[in-house]
Amino acid sequence: ERKATLYGYKVPEQPLKTVEKVDPSVVKDLPDYWNWADQGVVHAARNQGQCNDCYVMAGIGSVEAHSCIYKGACEKLSEQEAVECTDDKCNPGYFYEAFNYTINAGGAALDSDYPYQGKVVNPCDTTSRKRVEGTKVASWKSMPNDEATIRFYLYNNGPMHLGLKAYPNLDTYKEGIYTDTENGSPVYGHAVLLVGYGTENGIDYWILRVRK
């Protein structure tokens, strides 16, 4: 049931534009702990309802954070409009669909103008609601499978859309560092917002946006 209603990340099948890997030495100068949520630029995750739109939630979350960091526009943006204006809507989708939506629409709408419904309500319409200044994505690239590069860009640029291989026991995770991937094979892909990193007792970890 959770797989059918809460998850929905598809791995792109074709090669994507990818940033260059950084020299691992550059991360030595970064702080040992960083969390963009502590900087006040991350809105809390919300309940998806019965919609498989985690790819939109993470994408719009990234746009929200970056527009706040670089433009001072710290508004809650409408995931509802984004869902209705992406190709996959409430079905599993690709991480870049929310970014391309803002490119095509000229920016995102306010959540207060079109609140989240957890389902497709109307056909795509980006003309009846104003665009929030600073929310049009100029371009995007994917990250290489390299933790030093991810950490460098996460700290220097802002939160990132991330696709997880979700294992069965992730559903029962409560707190602490999640490391157990031995309880079965990955059963679904889940899109989340990567907001920080840290180290505890010699174990490096990533910080994901959470629901409050």
Image (tube, helix red, strand yellow):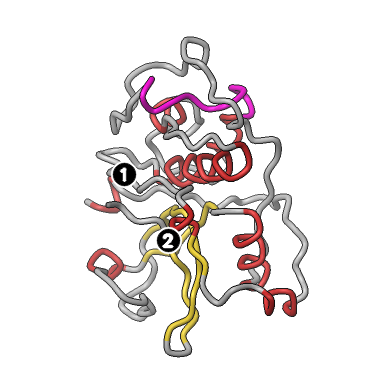
Query: Residue at the spot x=51%, y=56% of the render?
Result: 162
Q: Amino acid at mark 1?
A: Arg
Q: Residue at x 44, y 26 (%)?
A: 110
Report if residue 110 lies within the magenta region: yes
**Residue furthest bottom in the image:** 202
Which region is colored magenta? 103-113
**x then y, percent, for residue 205:** 47, 75
How many residues crowd around disc 1 within 10 Å: few (fewer than 14), some, or many (20 or more)? few
Q: Is residue 13 above or below residue 48?
A: below
8 or 197, which is in the foreground?
197
Q: Is residue 45 magenta?
A: no
Horizontal and vertical percent position of residue 124: 46, 18
In-front residue for pair 155/87: 155
Neighbours of disc 2 within 10 Å: few (<14), some (14-19), many (20+):
many
Q: Given the image, on which type of amino acid does mark 2 rest?
A: Leu
Horizontally, is 191 left or right of 102 in the view?
left
Query: x and y percent of residue 97 in the render?
Result: 55, 37
Residue picked out by circle 2: 208
Q: Which residue is mark 1?
A: 46
